Image (spheres, helix red, strand yellow):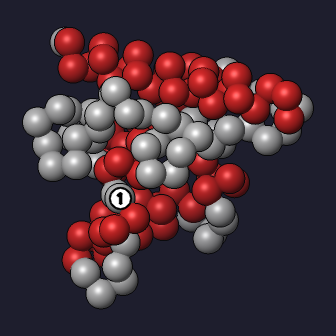
């Protein structure tokens, strides 16, 4: 079992390779740290970078960004629960239900830490 820090580092490396400026605050669809919440599909890292309203199969932003990211990560078409856990995008559902909230909070805190550190450098 990997730690949350390791999982988020893996997710950041994935984003670095596929969405190099994902962490910057001066890019289109910049991540808002005030609203970042990994348990919320609209306010999580991927939800903020590729909002659902852009996920229109006939429009280029979704095809080139959202589908590419999810397709690259999923590899075999698995759900975000499968590919998102090791990348720090989803909660580890193997833990008890009572601990899910704590894990989501810890994921959010670690993503905020990573982004804040990068923005400060």
**Residue at the extreme bottom:** 58
- Residue at (63% x, 69% y) in the render: 76
For disc 1, the neighbor class at 10 Å (few under 14, some 14 to 19, many from 20) is some
In the displayed structure, does residue 1 sit left or right of residue 116? right
- The image quadrant of residue 43 is top left
Find residue 60 and report its horizontal and vertical position in percent.
22, 77
| Residue 40 visible | yes
State the image coordinates of residue 52 (x, y, percent, origin top left). Answer: 40, 64
Furthest residue toward left: 26
Name the element at disc 1: loop
**Horizontal and vertical percent position of residue 28:** 15, 49
Answer whether residue 68 is visible to the viewer in this image: no
Q: Residue furthest right?
A: 96
Q: Which residue is mark 1?
A: 51
Quadrant of image for the N terminus: top right
Which residue appears at 71% of the width and 29% of the height?
101
Image position of 89 with respect to 110: above or below: below
Q: Seen in the image, is 10 located left or right of residue 120?
A: right
Q: Is residue 121 left or right of residue 101?
A: left
For the point 88% across and 32% down, the residue is 96
* x 57%, y 61%: residue: 74
């Amino acid at each position: 079992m990997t730690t949350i820090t390791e999982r988020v580092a893996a997710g950041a490396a994935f984003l670095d390779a596929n969405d190099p400026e994902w962490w910057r605050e001066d890019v289109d669809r910049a991540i808002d740290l005030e609203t970042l919440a990994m348990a919320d599909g609209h306010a999580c890292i991927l939800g903020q970078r590729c909002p659902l309203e852009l996920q229109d199969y006939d429009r280029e932003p979704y095809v080139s960004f959202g589908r590419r990211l999810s397709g690259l990560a999923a590899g075999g078409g698995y759900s975000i629960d499968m590919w998102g856990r090791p990348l720090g995008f989803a909660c580890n559902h193997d833990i008890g239900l009572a601990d899910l909230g704590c894990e989501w909070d810890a994921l959010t805190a670690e993503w905020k830490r990573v982004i804040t550190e990068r923005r400060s450098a």
